[in-house]
Image (spheres, rainbow, N blue to C red):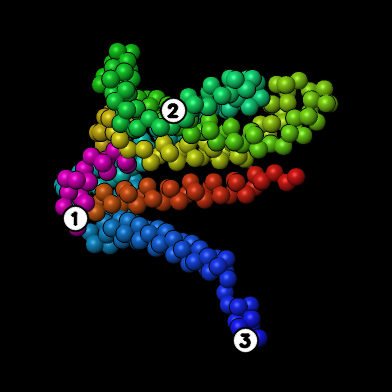
Amino acid sequence: MDEIQKKLTAPSKASREDVTGRIISYTCIAAIITLVISILYFITSRGIATFTTNHVNLWQFLSGKEWNPGSLNAKGQPQVGALPMIVTSFSVTILAALVATPFAIAVALFMTDIAPKSGAKFLQPVIELLVGIPSVVYGFIGLTVVVPFIRHLFGGTGSGILAGTIVLFVMVLPTITSLAVDALRAVPAYFRSASLALGATRFQTIYKVLLRAAMPRLLTAVIFGMARAFGEALAVQMVIGNAVLMPHNLVTPTSTLTSQLTTNIGNTIMGTLPNNALWSLALILLLMSLVFNLLIRYIGKRGEIKS
């Protein structure tokens, strides 16, 4: 009797595997949380050193137009004005998203509601191929094709916001397109059927029903693309000009936050003002990434389709 009771109360193989799986899962979750917290702490502690250790005024850092951390201005203050890089980063990001969004939504609509299955099967590998191309390849094509074309067309060096926008447009197009395809496919089929049954044409259904129903998810796709563009470094660095100047037009050399980081982070000494100022730029990038993620979560929750 005791042996039977022991066998019945002893943990089974399935329960042991379940406990093992939970331990592995919780360990991985804890490792990921620890890694994220460590990254946040490291970048934040380095980024605020410019203001706590070197006593740089925050408003001066965000609104100043002169960037030369190793030198002092006429007032004896370090030249750490990040405004030109902030303006340029937002400019190329917004322009690339504005240019890419119509193309991405048009391709997504073609794949989901217009093209036959063979057309969708052909376009899907093309989009996936664009996603897999390394950033340096985009940058090299921009440097050898886009920059000379702009130089021939408008004069000057050819580098600037326009060249960066064109390169980022091609880079974020597959991202926005893929997410837009998922957004349109997530619209329930009875939305289309009901619209067509009421006498609406295909394009009326697309414009008045599908796009409106999928709009929150489409906005999420655009924000994902903007986050991708805002954090791009190598390709933009190769075509933007890397001159920390306030952009007066689209074809003058300038610099983004990421291009300045990748260009100079290896040429500074840890703990000095030039190095701390670069970490402050990295902190701005981190905060913008958090903002993009919060926007994506907010729009995603509001855009859930209730069936």
Q: Residue at x 54, y 46 (%)?
A: 296
The residue pinned by badge 1 equals 270
In front here: 23 or 211?
Answer: 23
Q: Residue at x 24, y 54 (%)?
A: 276
Q: CA distance from mark 1 to mark 3?
A: 69 Å
Amino acid, disc 3 = Asp
Q: CA distance from mark 2 to mark 1?
A: 39 Å
Q: From the viewer's perspective, is 297 left or right of 67?
A: right
Viewer can see residue 9: no
Label 3's element?
helix
CB-based contact (under 8 Å), mark 1 and mark 3: no
Q: Nearer the viewer, mark 2 or mark 1?
A: 2
Q: Residue at x 43, y 28 (%)?
A: 130
Q: Percent position (x, y) of residue 147? A: 30, 20
In front here: 17 or 303?
Answer: 17
Label 2's element?
helix
Dot label at residue 129: 2
Label 1's element?
loop
In front here: 98 or 306?
Answer: 306
Q: Nearer the viewer, mark 2 or mark 3?
A: 3
Crowdedness of circle 1 by 10 Å Cα count: few (<14), some, many (20+)? Answer: few
Range of the magenta residues? 256-275
Amino acid, disc 1 = Met
The residue pinned by badge 3 equals 2
Q: From the viewer's perspective, is 68 left or right of 201?
A: left
Magenta-span inclusion, residue 259: yes
